[in-house]
């Protein structure tokens, strides 16, 4: 039976910024629109956290039973390592995804934005079929696009819309920026796993692009948020403070451009997630003060 520490590691806490950052950015845009609600923002955060933990356990289960995680450089996989039985991990995944659904229903019912239930259902299905089902889209190279949509556009704009009933250009810009960072985290992960994924028949976008192409994509993804910041600056000068977070990219970019592989890429995931979090906090603060 897996220990508590192993379950925590299996939940992949390094990915939690992917859930926290978009909600924080959305909160900043909501405050700018004068529609902030602390309880609605908290519920949105809990939905995002439940979803990402659920998708992490779902990936652990699906990859584990397929044998994709038999030899993995990254953090512990519960099923692949034999630390937990597949059915137990499956129940954990379904429990987290179910919790996300319940919390989302409460949020929608409290705000009256009923059509958002459709978006929520798509998010839950997207979380499962990333590596689940007969033809998981994560195995076909669509993972980065899904992360951009779900943990960028949907999470940021959903946080704003459920409270304000509308969205703004700064909110859209923040959503694109956070989505690019979130995709960058997955890109670094998939870059690390190119050898094992190729051998297992998992044709991620990184496998399709190859090592050099994936490194170029990572650099492009972490550059776009700052281009958006500069574009927003004429109307919202305070957002330029988000450029400060670019200094945190020095180390991960050096690893990427220096050809780092295997274990050397593991800190890149963490560092990119922390840059995304810092970018979101600074952008949210700037929008809130605008």
Image (cartoon, grey):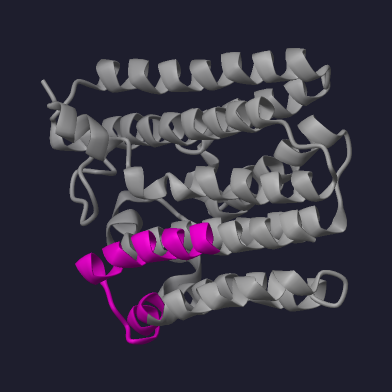
Towards the viewer: 167 or 268: 167
Q: Residue at x 76, y 40 (%)?
A: 160
* Magenta stretch in the rendered image: 251-278
Q: Is residue 165 above or below residue 284?
A: above
Quadrant of the rendering where the N terminus is positioned:
top left
Q: Residue at x 45, y 55 (%)?
A: 203
Q: Position of residue 4 (x, y in %)?
A: 17, 27
Q: Position of residue 290 (x, y in %)?
A: 80, 61
Towards the viewer: 223 or 218: 223
Residue 250 lies in quadrant: bottom left
Q: Position of residue 93 (x, y in %)?
A: 40, 23
Q: Is residue 67 above or below residue 287?
A: above
Q: In this image, 56 relative to 246: left or right?
A: left
Tell me if I can see residue 151 in this picture: no
Q: Position of residue 212 (x, y in %)?
A: 44, 80
Q: Is residue 253 above or below residue 26?
A: below
Q: Residue at x 48, y 28 (%)?
A: 50
Count of picture labels: 0
Q: Residue at x 53, y 33 (%)?
A: 127
Q: In this image, 31 relative to 40: left or right?
A: right
Q: In this image, 67 relative to 227: left or right?
A: left
Residue 68 part of the magenta-drawn span: no
Magenta stretch secondary structure, dominant: helix
Tell me if I can see residue 248 in this picture: yes
Residue 38 lies in quadrant: top right
Residue 233 lies in quadrant: bottom right
Q: In this image, 209 relative to 166: left or right?
A: left
């Amino acid at each position: 039976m897996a220990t508590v520490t192993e379950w925590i590691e299996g939940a992949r806490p390094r990915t939690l910024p992917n859930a926290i950052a978009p909600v924080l950015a959305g909160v900043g845009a909501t405050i700018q629109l004068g529609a902030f609600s602390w309880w609605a923002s908290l519920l949105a955060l809990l939905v995002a956290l439940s979803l990402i933990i659920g998708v992490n356990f779902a990936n652990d289960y699906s990859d584990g039973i397929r044998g994709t995680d038999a030899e993995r450089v990254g953090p512990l996989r519960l099923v692949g390592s034999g630390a937990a039985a597949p059915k137990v991990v499956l129940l954990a995944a379904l429990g987290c995804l179910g919790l996300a659904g319940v919390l989302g229903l409460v949020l929608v019912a409290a705000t009256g934005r009923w059509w958002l239930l459709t978006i929520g259902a798509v998010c839950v299905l997207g979380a499962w079929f990333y590596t689940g089902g007969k033809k998981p889209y994560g195995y076909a190279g669509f993972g980065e696009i899904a992360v951009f949509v779900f943990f960028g556009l949907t999470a940021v704009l959903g946080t704003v819309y459920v409270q304000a009933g509308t969205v703004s250009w700064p909110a859209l810009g923040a959503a694109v920026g956070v989505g690019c960072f979130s995709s960058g985290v997955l890109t670094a992960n998939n870059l690390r796993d190119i050898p094992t994924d190729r051998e297992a028949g998992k044709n991620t976008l990184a496998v399709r692009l190859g090592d050099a192409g994936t490194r170029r994509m990572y650099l492009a993804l972490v550059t776009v948020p700052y281009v958006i910041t500069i574009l927003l600056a004429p109307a919202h000068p305070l957002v330029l403070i988000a450029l400060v977070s670019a200094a945190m990219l020095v180390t991960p970019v050096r690893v990427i451009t220096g050809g780092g592989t295997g274990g050397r890429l593991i800190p890149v995931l963490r560092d990119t997630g922390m840059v995304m979090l810092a970018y979101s906090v600074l952008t949210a603060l700037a929008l809130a003060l605008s």
